[in-house]
Image (cartoon, rainbow, N blue to C red):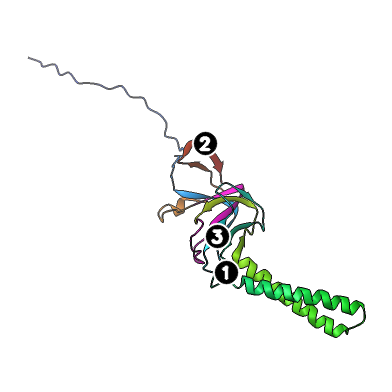
Amino acid sequence: TDKTVYVDTISVEAKTVEVKELALTKTFSGTLEGEEQANIYAKIPERIMNVKVRVGDYVKSGSVLFELDKGGASSQFYQAQAAFLNAQKNFERMKNLLAEGAISQQAFDQTETGYEVAKANFDAARSTVEITSPISGIVTALNVNIGDLANPQMPLATVANIGGMKAKFNVGESDVPNIYVGQAVQIFSEMNPDVIQSGK
């Protein structure tokens, strides 16, 4: 007798092989920084007496952010201030005497030089206890409080111009060959991943 064999069949559809691009997405962690950014450091290790800013404040270039102890052991502020005020009085006195013809131009020039040196010393001493921002921008980080000892090795604050931003991220060695100049990227914050910014 003949046996009937039933075999399951599967219908298939043939397609021509095509070359297509495969999109490969990689995610890297990084930090967002202002296009122009400055870390603010103290020049001397003195106690912080006043903090004039908070994170998020806008500051102008040259504005005072921190005041250190002007009478501290590392500070020469009061000595430089006294020398400057004395030189200033002497300069004004000699200027009047020169106008009256009571002193020579040479004597006045010496007094003027002494005044300019005293002023430069005072400005330098003041810059060590009145710490200013070198750029205009937003305070993005504040690392100290009133009463803390300023450490010249550690930034007191960060000020950034956030009109333009840049993202900094680390790329693994195996991923470096896949990255090129002008490549499209999308940047988002973990705090709000729905807000995505495209860049290159």
Checking the image for residue 49, the label placed there is 3
Residue at 43% x, 52% y: name it.
Answer: 175
Nearer the observer, 151 or 24? 151
Q: Is mark 1 on a helix, strand or loop?
A: loop
Q: Around disc 1, counting alpha carbons within 10 Å, would you say few (fewer than 14), some (14 to 19), or many (20 or more)?
A: some
Relative vertical location of residue 181 with respect to residue 21 in this rendering, above or below: below
Query: Marks 2 and 3, how far apart in space?
Result: 40 Å
Q: What residue type is labelled 1?
A: Gly
Q: Which of pointers 2 and 3 indicates the residue nearer the eye?
A: 3
The mark nearer the N terminus, 1 or 3, is 3
Residue 186 x/y as whole percent: 51, 41
The mark nearer the N terminus, 2 or 3, is 3
Residue at 56% x, 57% y: name it.
Answer: 50
Question: What span is colored magenta in the figure?
Answer: 145-168
Checking the image for residue 195, the label placed there is 2
Read off the residue under disc 1: 71
Residue 55 covered by magenta stretch: no
Query: Marks 1 and 3, how far apart in space?
Result: 11 Å
Residue at 75% x, 79% y: name it.
Answer: 114
